[in-house]
Image (spheres, rainbow, N blue to C red):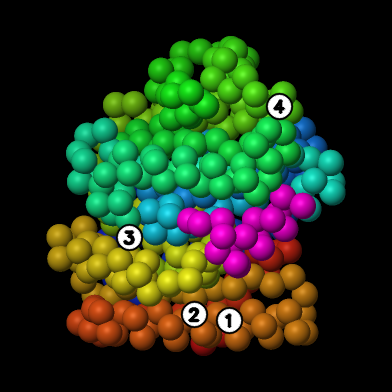
């Protein structure tokens, strides 16, 4: 059965863009609805641990979708290959601010550090590491070590957890401190309340409140993976992205395998933008998406009107101009098919405002 994402991939570019912008509008309306607002408040009251995810820009890696977690709960940090350095100034500031905000509210932070791979075909692995899963995994452990240096090696306030993401099944593989793993594919059939024992065994040093708030993600992923068993997913697990997003504020993009999202964290934005453009070009060449165009979307969130919004507008325009120059320089033929959109996002309402 074709998925909404699959059906959207096959439409002409103008219709795809209209549908995506309409999706953004629908997301903001739903996010601001009384029911969704109350659901988030209730979820955060029951599970107050702050959750951040360090992940690849690959459009297949959608942790809220794969864990059945309400949108707006998990804070994502995205970059090519999930490659980060906590010494990067902007990334370090954002991450530290997130941790401090949680600590001031009396809550700990769970830091999921992900790498991804395909069990079926190595070439469907992470392009950022040339499909070398061991290299991607080693880098995830290096980030976890940095997190310990930054926030404390006892992991009581910030718990860094290395997680594999198997893209053929959407399964999470949690890694313990001493090489043990907990694969959600092996947990199918267990009742949600039975998952606490293997999780506690895997991470005996994890504070109980973080374990409590990780369990819904694990249970959601087990249910998600179980539901996908036996489902033909060839079109979903292959690259079919047709949008390059640069910046932050892309919560509305909850269709898997649609966009390559590049956060503005590292000192070299040109490399991930160029690789994202190469992926789009390869998708067109292979016939996985129409070759009539692709979307470049730059976005920056803001909290308040006035200077905060003006700064967001300036940043979005810079990111859009920068990305366009990179694509024109490195992929001139593809650049001719670019549909550029620049926007800001009012973060309290998730409203996307176009600047074009």
Between circles 3 and 1, the one closer to the viewer is 1
Q: Nearer the viewer, residue 222 or 104?
A: 104
Q: Residues within 10 Å of mark 2 (few under 14, many from 20)?
A: many
Residue highlighted by disc 2: 319
Image point 70% across, 80% down: which residue? 309
Residue 256 badge: none
Judge whether 24 appears above or below 125 on screen: below
Tell me which segment is drawn in magenta: 84-100
- Position of residue 189 in the picture relative to residue 26 (left or right): left
- The percent coordinates of residue 56 (x first, y second) are 42, 53
Judge whether 31 appears above or below 342 on screen: above
Residue highlighted by disc 3: 241
- Quadrant of the image occupied by residue 134: top left
- The percent coordinates of residue 278 (x first, y second) are 25, 67
Residue highlighted by disc 1: 315
Residue highlighted by disc 4: 207
For marks 3 and 2 on the same chain, the one whose residue lies earlier in the sequence: 3
For marks 4 and 1 on the same chain, the one whose residue lies earlier in the sequence: 4
- Position of residue 260 in the picture relative to residue 233 (left or right): right
Is residue 11 shown in magenta? no
- Give the structural element (helix, strand or loop) at label 1: helix
């Amino acid at each position: 059965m074709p998925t909404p994402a699959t059906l959207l991939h096959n439409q002409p570019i103008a219709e795809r863009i209209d549908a995506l912008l309409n999706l953004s509008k629908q997301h903001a309306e739903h996010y601001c609805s009384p029911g969704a607002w109350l659901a988030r408040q209730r979820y955060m009251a029951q599970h107050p641990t702050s959750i951040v995810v360090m992940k690849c820009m690959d459009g297949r890696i959608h942790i809220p979708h794969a864990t059945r977690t309400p949108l707006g709960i998990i804070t994502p940090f995205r970059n090519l290959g999930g490659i980060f350095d906590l010494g990067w100034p902007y990334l370090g500031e954002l991450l530290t601010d997130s941790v401090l905000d949680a600590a001031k509210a009396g809550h700990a932070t769970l830091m999921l550090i992900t790498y991804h791979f395909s069990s079926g075909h190595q070439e469907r692995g992470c392009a950022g590491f040339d499909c070398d899963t061991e290299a991607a995994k080693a880098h995830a452990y290096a980030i976890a070590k940095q997190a310990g240096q930054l926030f404390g090696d006892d992991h009581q306030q910030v718990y860094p957890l290395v997680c594999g993401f198997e893209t053929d099944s959407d399964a999470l593989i949690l890694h313990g401190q001493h090489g043990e793993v907990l694969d959600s594919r092996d947990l199918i059939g267990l009742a949600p309340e039975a998952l606490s024992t293997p999780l506690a065994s895997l991470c005996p040093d994890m504070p109980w409140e973080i374990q409590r708030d990780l369990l819904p993600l694990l249970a959601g992923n087990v249910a998600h993976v179980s539901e996908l068993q036996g489902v033909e997913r060839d079109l979903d697990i292959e690259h079919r992205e047709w949008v390059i997003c640069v910046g932050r504020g892309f919560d509305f993009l909850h269709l898997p395998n649609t966009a390559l999202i590049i956060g503005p964290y590292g000192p070299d934005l040109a490399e991930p933008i160029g690789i994202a453009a190469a992926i789009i070009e390869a998708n067109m060449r292979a016939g996985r998406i129409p070759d009539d165009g692709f979307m470049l979307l730059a976005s920056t969130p803001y909290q308040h009107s006035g200077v905060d919004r003006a700064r967001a507008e300036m940043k979005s325009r810079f990111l859009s101009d920068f990305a366009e120059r990179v694509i024109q320089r490195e992929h001139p033929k593809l650049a001719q098919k670019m549909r550029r959109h620049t926007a800001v996002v009012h973060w309290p309402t998730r409203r996307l405002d176009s600047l074009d």
